[in-house]
Amino acid sequence: MVCIGLVIKNLFQNLKTIIMLELLENHPKTATVVKQWLLDKMLESLKDESLPEDFKQHVREQGIDNDKVAEILSGSPRSLFDVFDNHKVYIDISCLNDKFLWGINNDMNNSVYEIRKEADFAAIVEAFKLLEAKL
């Protein structure tokens, strides 16, 4: 039984990665903002004085492909909240009776989720669309 649960968990994770990849491909302006933010975070974590500035510039120029971004972000969608905050797309996750709801810019969605991470992910999907329209 444990094996079936693990298979189902992996299937859901793969599905979220596919959805995230589609979001990146279908919302190119938002994808650019997200990828730049992710690259900045990665380079910030490499704040090693021994790394030459030209290496950091090379990493920025090479960028990061959508597949890698989708894989990274599908596992932790909440990490994108700061990106959307920076563009005045404010995501709110609320808990009511041990269920989770989400809203954007004080407009609450009617969907209810058992797991907070699922509400986070659903909010990110909508936030992608809203930010794309703003850019």
Image (cartoon, helix red, strand yellow):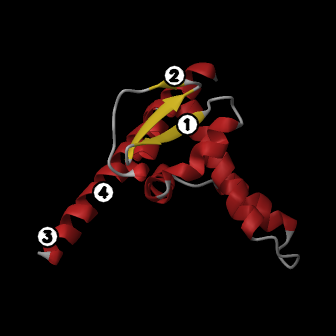
Label 1 is placed on what type of residue?
Asp
Residue marked by disc 4 = 14
Q: Give the CA separation, mark 3 to mark 2.
A: 38 Å
Position of 13 with respect to 93 (left or right) is left
Q: Give the CA separation, mark 4 to mark 1.
A: 25 Å
Where, quadrant-wise, is the C terminus in this rendering? top right
Q: What element carries label 1?
A: strand
Residue marked by disc 2 = 107
Whether label 3 touches label 2, CB < 8 Å? no
From the viewer's perspective, is the residue at label 2 or at label 4 nearer? 2
From the viewer's perspective, is the residue at label 4 or at label 1 nearer? 1
Q: What element carries label 3?
A: helix
Q: What element carries label 4?
A: helix
Which residue: 67% across, 55% down? 39
Residue marked by disc 1 = 92
Which residue: 27% across, 64% down? 10
Q: Give the CA separation, mark 2 to mark 1.
A: 9 Å
Q: Where is residue 43 in the image (x, y as percent from the top left)?
A: 74, 63
Q: Give the CA separation, mark 2 to mark 4.
A: 29 Å
Which residue: 49% across, 50% down? 77
Residue 131 in which image quadrant: top right
Q: Is mark 2 on a helix, strand or loop?
A: strand
* 132, above or below 66, in the image: above
